[in-house]
């Protein structure tokens, strides 16, 4: 019985202890809750006070900002009012100025109207006086006609004749002074340009002939060249188109032809046959065909070298070939290709001296005689043929085409490069030793020169001197005056320019003198 009682007492004790623990815990929680509540109330109160403080500070700051902005707005408004007042003052001044200008314009308009009215009145008065003057002149003219007994046409002719006599001396003097000034300026400039060009370029020149010689190792070779009954030489001449002269001259055989290309081809072919030793008709035909092909290549290479030496840029292959053919073409024994290269370089130098395009000038000079390479194949002179060939083979420059067609004055000169080509052509052709002129042509040119000068009134004699570079004209002193002599000199020079063709220039000198002869006895 004691054990259950003890357990019961223990259980009761535990229950009482648990109840007391629970009650104490509740009491402790209540105490803690009250502390937390009190702390919360304190924090809330402090927060409210802090919020009130912040709110008051914000209100004060907002009031200060508002006050500052109001002051700034007041200042801005004051500034704008000042600007508006300034603009109003400027507008007022502008209106006053416009008003003054308007008044001035109105005043000028009234003045202009008055002036126009006065001018109209004066014009009417002048017209009236002019009509009266014309009437008076007509009346006086009638009276003069009645007094002099001359008609109007006769009086005009007489007056014009008198004026011409009176003004002839003045015209001659002015013409002389004008020509003198032009001649001095142009001669000085021309001499400078030509002297510089000739000094900077000097080319060699040799006179080509129409025959070539071929050396042979022995005179026995002449028989082999002739062949049995002359078959070898006949075959050779037929294939090449040249004449082979085998005479008594030791060690050489002569090849003759006016066509330099054929002559050179024949010379080369004959040299090959002599070196080879096999000379018979079939071998001759084979060597001549081979040499002709080599000659075509050589011509093309010569043309390319000329284009490169002249430095004119790209050129059509056909024009290059024509230039190469000019190496075997002569004009008065002057090699045409060397002449064209010389003209090209002279044109380039003169163009650069004048501030023009030197490359274009060289192109004009190199191609100016290209028509001579085909003048035996086409009709017309070589300037026309050359211009047509250049145009046909892609030459588009107007200056080049005009220089080719007009370097002998066949067309009207419209480009400065044509003048340069003509001048360079004359320089190259007239250099001592450059060309050979036949005696007949030389004498004919002098006779034509003297005939032109002798055809003018008052000229007694005319003499061509200095190889046709000067004409001395003897005028009749009793039929001409000094003024007439100046005019005749000018007219003769113009007539020579229009009627004759000549290289360079011709000086015309008119001599008029009075000789008094008396004998003392």
Image (cartoon, rainbow, N blue to C red):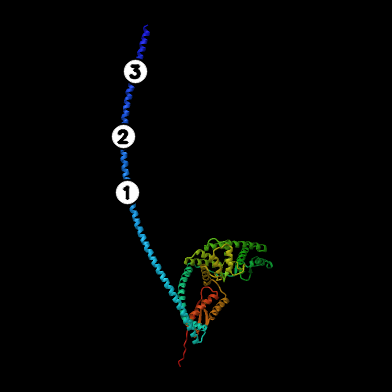
Q: Nearer the viewer, mark 2 or mark 1?
A: 1
Sequence-wise first label, 3 or 1: 3
Q: Residues within 10 Å of mark 1 (few under 14, many from 20)?
A: few
Q: Residue at x 43, y 73 (%)?
A: 119
Q: Quadrant of residue 257?
A: bottom right
Query: Under tag 2, what secondary structure?
Result: helix
Residue linked to disc 3: 21
Image disc number at residue 487: none
Q: Is residue 142 left or right of residue 287?
A: left
| N-terminal label among 3 and 2 | 3
Residue 50's disc is 2
Q: Are marks 3 and 1 in contact (CB under 8 Å)?
A: no
- Please provide percent x and percent y for residue 442: 56, 76
Camera-side residue: 159 or 54? 54
Marks 3 and 2 close (CB-CB < 8 Å): no
Q: Can you name the residue that lies furthest to the right here?
A: 229
Answer with the quarter of the image where residue 235 lies. bottom right
Q: Residue at x 38, y 65 (%)?
A: 104
Spatial CA distance of label 3 from label 1 is: 78 Å
Whole-percent x, y for residue 185 in the image: 45, 72
- First reached walking from the N terminus: tag 2 or tag 1: 2
């Amino acid at each position: 019985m004691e054990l259950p009682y003890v357990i019961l007492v223990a259980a009761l004790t535990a229950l009482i202890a648990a109840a007391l623990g629970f009650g104490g815990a509740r009491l402790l929680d209540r105490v803690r809750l009250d502390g937390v509540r009190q702390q919360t109330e304190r924090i809330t109160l402090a927060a409210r006070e802090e919020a009130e403080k912040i709110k008051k500070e914000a209100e004060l700051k907002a009031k200060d900002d508002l006050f500052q902005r109001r002051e700034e707005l007041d200042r801005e408004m004051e500034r704008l009012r000042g600007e508006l007042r300034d603009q109003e003052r400027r507008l007022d001044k502008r209106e006053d100025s416009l008003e003054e200008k308007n008044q001035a314009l109105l005043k000028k308009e009234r003045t202009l109207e008055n002036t126009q009215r006065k001018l109209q009145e004066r014009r009417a008065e002048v017209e009236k006086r002019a009509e009266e003057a014309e009437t008076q002149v007509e009346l006086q003219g009638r009276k003069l006609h009645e007094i002099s007994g001359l008609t109007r046409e006769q009086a005009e002719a007489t007056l014009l004749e008198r004026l011409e006599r009176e003004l002839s001396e003045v015209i001659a003097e002015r013409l002389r002074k004008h020509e003198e000034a032009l001649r001095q300026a142009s001669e000085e400039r021309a001499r400078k340009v030509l002297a510089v060009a000739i000094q900077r370029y000097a080319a060699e020149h040799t006179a080509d002939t129409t025959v070539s010689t071929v050396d042979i190792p022995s005179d026995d070779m002449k028989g082999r060249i002739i062949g049995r009954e002359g078959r070898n030489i006949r075959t050779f001449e037929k294939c090449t188109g040249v004449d082979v002269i085998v005479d008594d001259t030791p060690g050489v055989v002569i090849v003759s032809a006016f066509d330099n290309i054929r002559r050179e081809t024949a010379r080369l072919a004959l040299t090959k046959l002599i070196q080879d030793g096999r000379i018979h008709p079939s071998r001759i035909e084979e060597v001549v065909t081979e040499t002709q092909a080599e000659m075509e290549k050589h011509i093309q290479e010569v043309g390319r070298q000329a284009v490169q030496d002249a430095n004119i840029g790209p050129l059509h292959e056909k024009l290059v070939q024509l230039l190469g053919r000019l190496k075997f073409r002569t004009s008065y024994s002057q090699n045409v290709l060397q002449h064209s290269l010389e003209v090209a370089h002279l044109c380039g130098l003169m163009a650069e001296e004048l501030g023009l395009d030197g490359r274009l000038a060289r192109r004009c000079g190199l191609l100016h005689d290209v028509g001579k390479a085909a003048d035996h194949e086409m009709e017309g002179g070589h300037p026309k043929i050359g211009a047509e060939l250049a145009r046909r083979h892609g030459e588009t420059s107007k200056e080049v085409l005009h220089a080719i067609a007009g370097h002998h004055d066949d067309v009207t000169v419209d480009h400065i490069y044509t003048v340069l080509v003509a001048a360079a052509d004359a320089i190259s052709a007239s250099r001592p030793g450059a060309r050979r002129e036949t005696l007949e042509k030389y004498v004919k040119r002098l006779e034509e020169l003297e005939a032109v000068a002798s055809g003018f009134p008052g000229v007694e004699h005319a003499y061509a001197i200095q190889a046709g570079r000067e004409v001395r004209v003897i005028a009749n002193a009793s039929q001409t005056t000094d003024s007439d002599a100046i005019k005749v000199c000018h007219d003769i020079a113009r007539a020579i320019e229009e009627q004759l063709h000549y290289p360079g220039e011709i000086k015309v000198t008119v001599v008029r003198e009075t000789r008094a002869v008396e004998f003392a006895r």
